[in-house]
Image: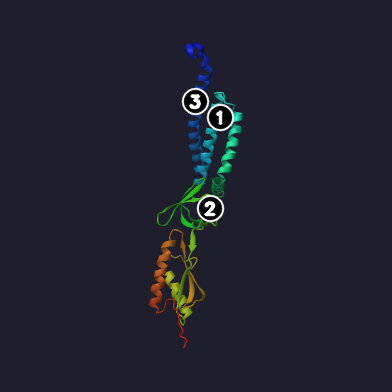
Amino acid sequence: MDELFPEFLQPYQGLIVGAATALLIFVVGWIASKWVHALCLRAARRGGMDEALARFLSSMAQYAVLAFAVIAALSKVGVQTTSLVALLGAAGLAVGLALQGNLGHFASGVMLLLFRPFTLEDKVRVAGENGQVKNVGLFASTLTTPSNEEIIVPNGSITSDVIINYTSQKRLRAGIAIGIAYGSDVNRAMAVMIEACKSVDSVLGDPAPSVNFSGFGASSLDFEVRPWATTDDYLGMLHDVRIALYDALNAAEIEIPFDQIVVHRAD
């Protein structure tokens, strides 16, 4: 081994060999971590695992291999890895205390990936926001709204609030409020509303649309029209049904009143 090094480097040959070995271990570990990530992701997708969960587990496997490579490389240059692990643990505790809010978002992200209340491309309402899920990260999730706005929602806000998944049930029932004038024939009006719903192609026949007499308003008899549609057709169906209701009630000469205020004059 001595003949491989010039005389002035021979005192440092142990350090040089250790550093070269450490570099080789790190490079091999880096390549292996990428390979493990791709392999795990491919296996998870082939097994039908949810895409977001597959990405998370593949990343965890990659980081585990990389961490092992770093520790092995450091041991080759004389670093006491036992002390290093203890130091990293203490540093991790300090960082954890400083970033406990972010760690809460991280824990929420893990919960979302494990329990999967929604998956990628689902249409949801989370933390008061409506949108389609585009990414579930470790700290935040990304939604695209119907207006094509990108919203980044912290995972802690998602898990601490109600989650509504519009996609999971494949079909949705609307509740469209409408009022007719006092003195109108209630049964005839309800029949007209049902036929108006049935005239819209996106309204499902099973379950059939229904109409509920919901109350006596200040200026109108109030109803809730309840048509069903598939998740993909839902928003368009709301628009079409409202138009059909307005046209059908006008054609049947059933008045849709506006709010009125009656003022009594005191003499």
The residue at the point 55 percent across, 24 percent down is: 76
Sequence-first tag of 2 and 3: 3
Q: Relative to 9, is 224 above or below? A: below
Q: CA distance from mark 2 to mark 1?
A: 36 Å
Residue 252, disc:
none
- Secondary structure, mark 2, is helix
Comparing 112 with 217, the one in front is 217
Nearer the camera: disc 2 or disc 3: 2
- Disc 2 crowd rating (10 Å Cα; few below 14, some 14-19, many 20+) is some
> Are discs 1 and 3 less than 8 Å apart at CB?
no
Q: CA distance from mark 2 to mark 3?
A: 42 Å
Residue 200 showing in the rendered view:
no
The residue at the point 49 percent across, 40 percent down is: 41
Find disc 3 in the rendering and name its residue.
Answer: 23
Q: Relative to residue 90, is residue 44 drawn left or right?
A: left
- Secondary structure, mark 1, is helix
- Secondary structure, mark 3, is helix
Q: CA distance from mark 1 to mark 3?
A: 12 Å
Find disc 1 in the rendering and name its residue.
Answer: 71
Find disc 2 in the rendering and name its residue.
Answer: 157
> Are discs 2 and 3 less than 8 Å apart at CB?
no
Quadrant housing residue 238: bottom left
